[in-house]
Image: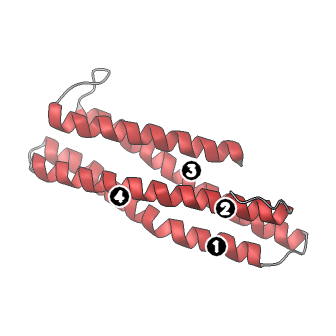
Amino acid sequence: MWLFMNICYGLSLLTFLLLLVGLGQSFWHFFIFQAGHLTFMLLTSILYLLTETLVIFFFVGTGVSIKEYCLEHKLDAGFHKRSLAVKYRVYPPLLLNILLMIILFVSVGAMNTHQLPVPVYQILFLICLAHFIQVKIIEHRSFKENTQIILDMSGIKRTV
């Protein structure tokens, strides 16, 4: 679990850095590894979707594990309810961000073919990036709360 969670953190940081570079490319038109903005954003979109899919699977997997552990050890169902509350808190903004980012990634092509004005694309990019940061804060709090649930189940009285 710890390794998986740290991989999510690492990929989130890498995605954020790639998004910043992509935003910079939209303004200053520079190349990274001979990749222009369109190609670079394709790579960024793949990494972004991989990262967010892993985050979703983390919460699904730990939720299932918590439920099974509670059933096997006849523990209070409150632990499972707490894990569900974490998922209900993290999923709506996460899924909205995925939708916004997909719109952004499709907009790259529209901007590249001059069907969408560059300033409109850049404003959309800034909105998506700001929302991405908000979602990462929510995910961080949810990771902490999920970890606390597992610590509480194990009897460790430590606040994360």
Q: Earlier in the sequence, mark 1 or mark 4?
A: 1
Residue under the image location 37 percent in, 36 percent down: 18
Q: CA distance from mark 4 to mark 2?
A: 22 Å
| Label 2: few (<14), some (14–19) or many (≥20) C-alpha neighbours in 10 Å | many
Label at residue 131: 4
Residue under the image location 38 percent in, 54 percent down: 132
Tell me the amino acid under the disc marked 2.
Asn
Counting from the top left corner in percent of width and height, residue 128 is at 30, 55
Q: Is residue 45 above or below residue 77?
A: above
Label at residue 146: 2
Q: CA distance from mark 1 to mark 2?
A: 10 Å
Q: CA distance from mark 1 to mark 4?
A: 23 Å
Q: Earlier in the sequence, mark 3 or mark 4?
A: 3
Q: Which is in the foreground here, disc 3 or disc 4?
A: 4
Mark 3 lies on residue = 54
**Between 89 and 160, which is closer to the camera in this rendering?**
160
Left or right: where does residue 57 sit relative to residue 105? right
Q: Earlier in the sequence, mark 4 or mark 2?
A: 4
Whether residue 65 is visible: no
Tell me the amino acid under the disc marked 1.
Leu
| Label 1: few (<14), some (14–19) or many (≥20) C-alpha neighbours in 10 Å | some
Tell me the amino acid under the disc marked 4.
His
